[in-house]
Image: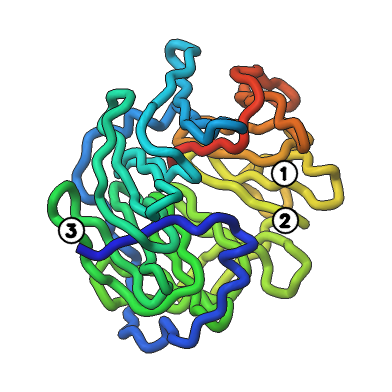
Amino acid sequence: MHAFAIRRSAASRRARVLTAALAAIALVVCRPELGRASAPNPYDIDVFALNSTSYSMSQWDYTTGQWTDLGGPEATNLVTGDAGVFDWYENTGDIYEYDGTPGKWTAVGGPGNWFVESGSHLFGTSPNDDYVAEWNGPGKGWTEIGGATGEIWGGKFGLVATNPTSNYAYLYSGTPGQWTYIGAASQYVVTDNAIYRADPDGSAFVDQWVGPGDNWEEVGGPCDEIYGGGAGLFCAEMYDNDNIYVYNGTPNSWTRIGGPGATFAVSGSYLFGLGPQPAHAYVALWNEQPGNWSIIGGSERDIFAGD
């Protein structure tokens, strides 16, 4: 079984430079088909919070308005979506799957360097980022699907990986070893129906991939950070105190909906925000109207949501 673990921060991930390249992988031009059959995702309407002192994880349920301590191993990060809920254990780098009952987690791999979900699939990079692999499900191990990579991004639309020595990006076809070059940028977001990137010219404007190959359309910005998932595409603007904007679906049409916030998380249906630094004093749910948010929790270290 191949083994994986999650990298600690975006800054540390981007600082790593490796020598191998995804360009060595055989490429085909084809949209990925990643939909391993699964039940509807029960975590779409939840947000998960990492406690600011104990590093324990809690889950919020939209239907009940309650938080539940998930128990299990000490957490550093969560990966959530249609493939399930997974937790990384800092001391060993092992990754665990949550079975839906507080305190019940099962090790599925470890250590590695980064994990994402795409559709109903879990993907990870090896400890030295020298390959990408897909988890085959409980007790079935991992399958190597690609070569060395810098970072990976996932969503229902597909899986994107960058070259370890450049910002060149590739879209996974769904067949091991088959990837398509789609351009270059420092940040990507994959939603249910699109891929977005921070413009590689350094201005932090946002482009949408229109394909085939390296074909993109500018949709707005500038953005310090972009967030996306089933609920849409969102931009935290660097020149506007980290206020948050929602993309309206038409290039250069955005609506300011709130902020400032330290970070945000997008589930299949909802946007959540964490109060600004340094206190991170609350977790809030956006009620889909500009400026309309509900506080649903207190101080947390970080928040996560499924795609």
User: What's the residue type where badge 3 is placed?
Assistant: Gly
Mark 1 / mark 2, whichever is N-terminal: 2
* Mark 1 touches mark 2? (CB < 8 Å): yes
* Mark 3 touches mark 1? (CB < 8 Å): no
**Residue 97's quadrant in the figure?**
top left
Label 3: few (<14), some or many (≥20) within 10 Å?
some
Q: Mark 1 falls on what kind of element? A: strand
Q: Does residue 281 appear left or right of residue 36 in this picture?
A: right
User: Which of 110 and 35 lies nearest the eye of the viewer?
Assistant: 110
Residue placed under numbered mark 2 in the picture: 220
Q: Mark 2 falls on what kind of element? A: strand
**Residue 27 position in % (x across, y down):** 34, 82
Mark 2 / mark 3, whichever is N-terminal: 3
Quadrant containing the C terminus is: top left
Numbered disc in front, either 2 or 3: 3
**Residue 154 position in % (x across, y down):** 43, 56
Q: CA distance from mark 1 to mark 2?
A: 8 Å
For image coordinates 39% across by 50% down, the residue present is 156
Q: Does residue 299 appear left or right of residue 224 in this picture?
A: left
State whether residue 135 is above or below residue 270: below
Whether residue 29 is visible, yes or no, is no
Q: Label for residue 141?
A: 3
Label 1: few (<14), some or many (≥20) within 10 Å?
some
User: What's the residue type where badge 1 is placed?
Assistant: Trp
Colour pattern of the rendering: rainbow
Q: Label for residue 254?
A: 1
**Residue 161's quadrant in the figure?**
bottom left
Q: Mark 3 falls on what kind of element? A: loop
